Amino acid sequence: QVQLVESGGGLVQAGGSLRLSCAASVSMFSIDAMGWYRQAPGKQRELVATITKGGSTNYADSVKGRFTISRDNAKNTVYLQMNSLKPDDTAVYYCTADYWGGRYWGQGTQVTVSS
């Protein structure tokens, strides 16, 4: 089992920045990959970014060049730095961890971007 606790969401104006954090209850070295997904009202949940144990990253086309995923193994934490935010980025953001064949989800954190 992995517990994931997200933080850092909030309200920001378009063009602004936020950094989301996700703290894992187990060592990052035991987690194959971590990621961020988001779900906007009335829309399906979608992938935002992932990072593997080896540090390889993957981004949705809609956030490339604006968002950066990173991990701090010493703190068992993954981050999502979000710059140049747009109203379309408004959603609940969820952290995930792929651990021993299962995918675990955090409770989500709300990000609201005003125009």
Image (spheres, rainbow, N blue to C red):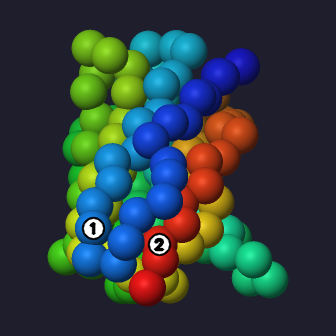
Farthest left residue in view? 65
Q: Residue at x 39, y 20 (%)?
A: 76
**Which residue was labeled with disc 2?**
113
The residue sitting at 48% across, 59% down in the picture is 11
Alpha-carbon span between mark 1 and mark 2: 8 Å
Residue type pointed to by label 2: Val
Tell me which amino acid carries mark 1.
Gly
Which of the pair 42/59 is nearer the observer? 42
The mark found on residue 16 in the picture is 1
Quadrant in the picture for residue 12: bottom left
Res. 58 in view: no
Q: Secondary structure at mark 2?
A: strand
Q: Which quadrant of the view contains residue 46? A: bottom right
- Identify the image quadrant of residue 59: bottom left
Q: Residue 56: image x %, image y %?
A: 25, 52
- Residue at screen point 38% across, 27% down: 77
Q: Is residue 79 visible?
A: yes
78 left or right of 72 in image: right
| Residue 74: numbered disc | none
Counting the numbered discs, the total is 2
**Quarter of the image where the C terminus is located:** bottom left
Q: Vertical placement of 44 versus 79: above or below?
A: below
Other residues around mark 1 within 10 Å, as few (<14) / some (14–19) / many (≥20): some
Q: Is residue 72 above or below residue 33?
A: above
Report the residue at 65% width, 22% height from top: 2
The answer to whether mark 1 and mark 2 are in CB contact below 8 A is yes
| Quarter placement of the N terminus | top right
Q: Residues within 10 Å of mark 2 (few under 14, many from 20)?
A: many
Q: Nearer the viewer, residue 4 or 18?
A: 18
Q: Secondary structure at mark 1?
A: loop
